[in-house]
Amino acid sequence: MQKWNRWVVSGLSVASIASATLANAPQEPTKVEKKPEAERRFDLVVREDIFAGFGGDDDALKRGEAECDKAIKLEPKNAEAMVWRGAIHVFQAGQLFGKGQPVQAFPLWTAGLKEMDDAVRLDPDNVGVRIPRASVLLPASRNTPAAMRDSLLKTVLEDFETIFKKQADHLDSLGTHPRGELRMGLADTYRLLGKLDKSKEQLEAIAKELPDSEYEAKAKEWLAAAPTTKLAHNCIGCHSK
């Protein structure tokens, strides 16, 4: 069960969720008054507590979950609150798997997956719903039984491809970080599914579009690696430092 511990610590980290979720969502303007909580992006309400919780602060995680519960009580079909609460439950399941407690872990795992899936069904084109699910399931897939792995990866790919298509007409206007993370997420997922040509396409696009960046260096490293080399992308950005 040690592999579950590794996933909890590195895969479902601030870098994993924050990079993909926040980088692809429109940012609030600076130097303006904060909006009332009900009008703010939901991730801005909960992210600090949830990230701290994923880092080991149990009280912060409880606060984040309480905010999700409150939002869902007020609006039962609040997809963003649902996907974050689902992410918390999957994280908690990972902790229990790591402790060798599968009986306690599976109900949380199942509930977390269902809540994230329900959120996507409610709001399938929302970046703030699709990307958190993909960012949770991609690292989780690396340590699940083979029978579950491909199913999880297909869900991840659906999420990333949906957002990629949604942003295709303005991809070149995205900053280095959001574009690099989205393309690396696709490259990573394609590679895990054995779609090496598609992975190569994303890596070559990174090398061409983001010269002199850490993403270019990472893409070239992956392009030079043998097909059997085990590779995994971790967020390149402030959250990972």
Image (cartoon, rainbow, N blue to C red):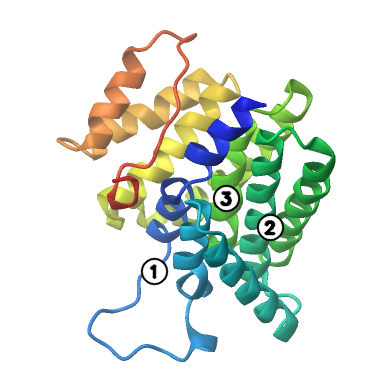
Q: Which mark is residue 137?
A: none
Which residue is denoted by mark 2 in the rendering? 86
Q: How many marks?
A: 3
Label 1 SS? loop
At 64% across and 43% down in the image, what residue appears?
95
Mark 2 and mark 3: Cα distance apart in space:
20 Å
Precedes in sequence: disc 2 or disc 3: 2
Image location of residue 170, percent across then percent down = 36, 57
Query: Mark 3 or 1, which is nearer the eye?
Result: 1
Q: Where, quadrant-wise, is the N terminus in this rendering?
A: top right
Q: Is residue 181 left or right of residue 217?
A: right
Which residue is denoted by mark 1 in the rendering? 26
At 60% across and 26% down in the image, what residue appears?
3
Precedes in sequence: disc 2 or disc 1: 1
* Badge 1: residue crowd in 10 Å (few <14, some 14–19, many ≥20): few
Q: Which mark is residue 162?
A: 3
Image location of residue 237, percent across then percent down = 29, 47
> Which residue type does callout 1 highlight?
Pro
Mark 3 and mark 1: Cα distance apart in space:
17 Å
> Which residue type does callout 2 highlight?
Gly
Label 3 SS? helix
> Which residue type does callout 3 highlight?
Thr
**138 in relation to 56, above or below:** above
Residue 210, located in which quarter of the rendered image?
top left
Precedes in sequence: disc 3 or disc 1: 1
Image location of residue 39, percent across then percent down = 50, 87
Image location of residue 23, percent across then percent down = 38, 57
Query: Mark 2 or 1, which is nearer the eye?
Result: 2
